[in-house]
Amino acid sequence: MAAPMELSCWGGDWGLPSLHPESLTVMAYAKFAGAPLIVNTINNSWRAPKGDIPVLVSKDTVISQPAKILNFLRKQKYNADYELSAKQGADTLAYIALLEEKLLPALLHTFWIEAENYCSVTKPWFASRIAFPLSLYLPGKMSREALNRILLTKGGPPLYTLTEVEAQIYRDAKECLNLLSKRLGTSQFFFRDTPTTLDAFVFGFLAPIYKVCFPRIQLQEHLKQLPNLCRFCDDILTCYFRLTVSGHSPAGQDTADANLQKLTQLVNKESNLIEKMDDNLRRSPQHPPRKLTTLKLAAGGEESSPMSRLSP
Amino acid sequence: ATLCFQAFLQMCNLPIRVICRANAEYMSPSGKLPFIHVGNQVVSELGPIVQFVKAKGHSLSDGLDEVQKAEMKAYMELVNNMLLTAELYLQWCDDVTVEEITHPRYGSPYPWPLNRILSYQKQWEVKRKMKAIGWAGKTLEQVLEDVDQCCHALSQRLGTQPYFFNKQPTELDALVFGHLFTILTTQLITDELSEKVKNYSNLTAFCRRIEQQYFEGHEKESSTIAARSAKKSLLR
């Protein structure tokens, strides 16, 4: 338990700690279970990403897939599912299968295959975080793998063209989002009041769709029509990811800070103004209770002098 | 897989006849087996068949509320994801099984060398798919562990109820029955897969109950013999 655990994963943007669904799932689970992970986001250094990301390294053990990483964390006694009943554990497996079969293909398509999205957002973003010359090769490889996966799992007959496959996978993804929304209902998390493995997986898959600004966003538009899922993502982001990952402030935190600063400045200005007015009133020639009559008599003069004193 | 359909259609009280053909894969509109031929229409795969049957006015899941329907779909995906992939892995990626059982069976309707060519082609296709979804690196033990996890989840969900959604059978029951019955009754090199399922007594009881209720009521010989030979010659 005491051995430090390091997680290597893709970094984040647009208010997310990571853009990569699997990395995000593992990070979320670690937060829920209270596991002390040292997160190293892949940046433009020569330590090239080896194999599948995310990768957890603890002493001599190297583990690479999210399910295996979560199993390892559970064995280290960081278990977010401790209070679940056996049936709820079974439901978790089932819903994760649903996410992988129905939602993941559309997610991969939005990121890696949709031409506009890939060229204007995904490829530059990932390339900027990989060292040259690997940055020329790796994003293309990830895109080809995504296409391969979609075609092999979903592209059998009678769907022969890529457009038909695309239509099918987006239909499936929208249906999956609807099902998740119905299952979540009005609760804060999927099982009771504490987040579990299922919440980590759902968050990992939904948050990139929700937050990343792509040119082609049909899935995001559909998601935004399901307010309980949006609220679910926002809640997790504010409650568990407010403290930043490896010193890198997410954009959301910045705007919150900026707003706070502006508000403070406004309040300070107001109080300064009030103080000044107070001062002026005190410094102005003392008027005995006859003030009213003198005011009436010298209305123009009286009014103009405080104004002239206030203006810089 | 044939059994899932038979079970589903029996549960809807729709009479069916099972026919075996060597070129069945080519007759099917999607290339996948089995398919049903009703009047002028031919429909294949569980999803479209369920919708077709629903359009004709028979549905097993009308009594479920929205959350239960979501659960049912999730469990069906779990079965497809884990059990189906494990069955495919065992048939096509485990060398011993491939050599001794799958190649002969798959190529049996064809003369040499077509039988070897077709079965190698199919094997290559399946291996590509396994690689794409990340199962290529799995050993047989890991696959069996996944099957165990899946059966554990199904067993927990079933509990002591007669069907997954209490009193009435649904598409999920048909699907689970089809897969589990196939695993329990198909002869492989080792019995490890069926042993995994047998560990869960409520699942074996579930299979027996559905077999008795829906398959023995009808002409036992023709339906079960047809089902068994359908399994043998129409491998996916």
Image: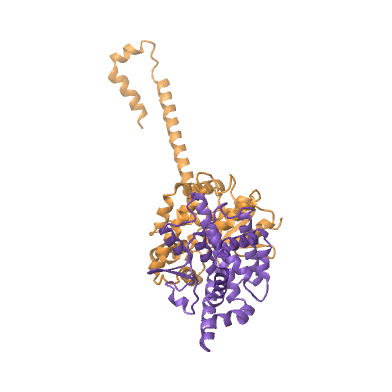
Chain colours: A orange, B purple
- Residue B135: image x %, image y %? 58, 70
- Residue visible at 53% across and 60% down in the picture: B76
Q: Position of residue A286 (x, y in %)?
A: 40, 15
Q: Is residue A242 visible in this depiction of the protein?
A: yes
- The answer to whether B161 appears left or right of A133 in the picture is right
For residue B147, which quarter of the picture?
bottom right
Q: How many marks?
A: 0
Nearest the viewer among A145 and A310 is A145
Is residue B136 visible in the rendered image? The answer is no
Residue A236 location, x and y as percent?
Answer: 54, 48
Between A295 and B124, the one nearer to me in the picture: B124
Q: Identify the residue at the far bottom of this view.
A: B112
Residue B130 x/y as whole percent: 55, 72
In the rendered image, the quadrant that contains the N terminus of chain A is bottom right
**Against B168, is B35 above or below?**
below
- Residue at position x 47%, y 49% from top? A230
Q: Is A3 placed left or right of B118 in the picture?
A: right
> Quarter-wise, where is residue B49 in the image?
bottom left
Image quadrant in which the C terminus of chain A is located: top left
